[in-house]
Amino acid sequence: MYVAPDGGSHTLHALTGRDVGTESQPVRYSKDGSFLRLRQINIQTMHLEFPDGRISVFQKTDSAAGTNFCGGNA
């Protein structure tokens, strides 16, 4: 789930018929009309892509429980 600065939450899903990436580099999409795409680049980095071309980069900085990306095991 992505929580936007305005407090809106966007659940991201693997969608049939779309690029879902690989097990180690999954791709997820919003289904709420926000047209967000989340790509895991590597074990530490995610790119959240917006429909206007902006990309927010998220870096995993801790190994604490609950910090997994895309429900992975990393």
Image (tube, grey):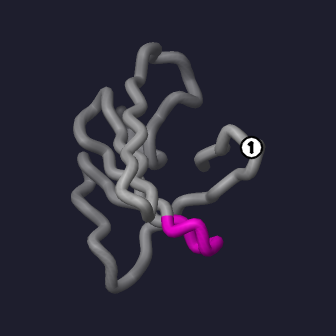
Mark 1, residue position: 6
Q: What residue type is labelled 1?
A: Asp
Left or right of residue 41: residue 60: right
Q: Residue 42 versus residue 54: which sits nearer the camera? A: 54
Magenta run includes residue 40: no
In front here: 18 or 74?
Answer: 18
Q: Specify the quadrant of the image occupied by residue 16.
A: bottom left
72 sits to left or right of 24: right
Mark 1, other Cα within 10 Å: few <14 / some 14–19 / many ≥20: few
Residue 45, compared with residue 27, is above or below; it is: above
- Look at 46% across and 65% down and name the residue there: 29
Image point (43%, 76%), residue name: 15
| Highlighted magenta segment, given as a residue range | 30-35
Residue at (53%, 17%) from the top-left corner? 64
Apparent side of residue 31 relative to residue 54 in the rendered image (left or right): right
Q: Residue furthest bottom?
A: 17
Q: Quick check: 67 above or below 61? A: below
Look at the magenta stretch and give its main secondary structure.
loop
Q: Does the magenta stretch include residue 32?
A: yes
At mark 1, the secondary structure is: loop
Displayed quadrant of residue 65: top right
User: Which residue sits furthest front?
Assistant: 52
Residue 50, percent from left and from top: 45, 56
Q: Position of residue 2 (x, y in %)?
A: 59, 46
Q: Which of 16 and 57 is in front in this view?
A: 57
Examine the rendered structure and indicate whether residue 61 appears above or below residue 40: above
Q: At 31% from the left edge and 27% from the top edge, which residue is drawn?
A: 44
Quarter of the image with the C terminus is: top left
Residue, far right = 7
Quadrant hosting residue 12: bottom right
Please give left or right for residue 54 compared with residue 5 in the image: left
